[in-house]
Image: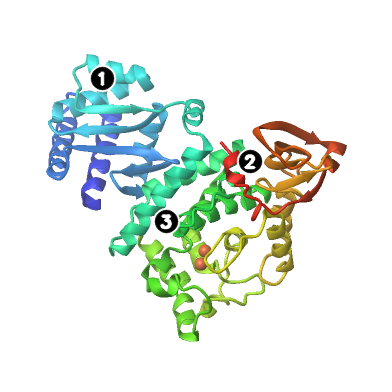
Amino acid sequence: MQLDQLKKIIYGMSGVHKGLRLYPAAHPAIQQQAQNLAKDFLAAFQKKPRIRLGILEDTLFFEKHMFVLSEPAIEEVRTLIAERGLEGLEFEVGLSAQEIQRFFQILHESEVGGEALAQLLTDQGITHIQPVVLETQEADERAEPPRKIYQRALTVVSHIFNDVRMGRIPSTAEAIEVVGSMVRSTLSEPHALLALSLLKDYDNYTFTHSVNVSVIALAVGHACGLSEEKMRTLGLGALLHDIGKLIINKDIINKPGRLTEAEYEEIKKHPASGSVIAGQMEGISEEVVDIILGHHLNYDRSGYPADARGRKISQLADMATIADTYDAMTTLRSYQRPVTPRMAVKNLMDLSGTTLHPILLQKLVDYLGPYPVGSLVRLDSNELAVVTKVGDRQGGNSVDLKIITTSEGKKLPQPTLATLSGADLARIIAEVDPVGRNIEVTEYFD
Ligand SMILES: [Fe+2]
Ligand SMILES: [Fe+2]
């Protein structure tokens, strides 16, 4: 659907709404506005019989278009929806000028919102405008556990990648929505999504890598005390960071072993081409584009693209670089043995101050604690356990474990749960590498 067509409807709605502050509903000016609006709707219904206007993360969207720039008419319609406790409005073919006029009159005369508004509209015979009632956040979160959010993020990434491969400009709404859920999950239940980012799906490396980098970047952002809004920017940039790789020859991307110089030159183009693709997507901010462009610029500003080195790149890009490096280190690739979370932290620290931003990295390291979630550890009793949760976000003051073997190393049929805190944390004596022990750490996360 054409953007100007949708914009015209929004302006029309704002017009009727404002008009009712000046004139009674029966005034010819209002009638005229409602008729014009009905015509604009009719034109839109030629393409689709049901269209949706709504709010996602505080931004107004209409069908697939996000309206990030604030304009008075857009703000007016956004407020109109938000104030009534709605997620959006759905308009259906058959909508008449009279219904439009009645709808705005009801909004003008009554303060009701949510379900009550939906009921009132039905009672008044307005059937072609349906309010989408906002579910409470609590219900939202109950309905969507971290694993589901993670899966949804994978699906969103697959859609976006598919669009890019087909040469289409990907739509942004789904990505913005899922990143919003990831941010909320990270804030309310730190480490839960992070644990899932350990799920290494070898076949789907391209998708899981994008989701993992986003999840880990959010952990960095949370550790650094970013605002929720900045977290959303960071999460989105990280989710899209490698989008430019999709237009590079697959043989180069998947090549095991060393690349030739020419092949490496090709790879080095992906931040710049990714930033161009993202720049064409609706509702993607400059800052998100910057993360994509800067994710291979090292802390010492070596790295690539060389021509972006002089440019001021936000710290969000440095956070994404840390996440990208961390995920690459812990992932099983055809040419690389995965390292454990604790070993990965040690390897990251080796890059502190050169490749990686030292202060931001230290915050992440403190956040992860000495035994990051997903670590397999040996206790002083000689039992093996998986770290399933790290408590206090600034230093891991408590750790939840699933003990999975006996002291003799026999696997337990059911793991036993334990929480260690304070001095008891010293009961963890070492990290153990699950590779070769026939232990799949991710099995212990539900
Ligand atoms: Fe990259
Ligand atoms: Fe990457």
| Residue 166 left/right relative to 309 | left
Establish if 92 lies above or below 58: above
Tag 1: amino acid? Leu
Give whichever of 15, 52 is nearer the camera: 52
Q: Are marks 1 and 3 in contact (CB under 8 Å)?
A: no
Mark 1 highlights which residue?
121
| Residue 12 left/right relative to 265 | left
Graded by Cα atoms within 10 Å as few (under 14), some (14 to 19) or many (20 or more), the crowding at tag 2 reads many
Q: Is mark 3 within 8 Å of ligand 1?
A: no
- The C terminus sits in image quarter: top right
Q: Secondary structure at mark 1?
A: helix
Mark 2 highlights which residue?
190
| Residue 100 left/right relative to 188 | left
Marks 2 and 3, the one that precedes in the sequence? 2
Measuring from the top left, give residue 332's x and y in whole percent. Answer: 56, 60
Mark 3 highlights which residue?
284
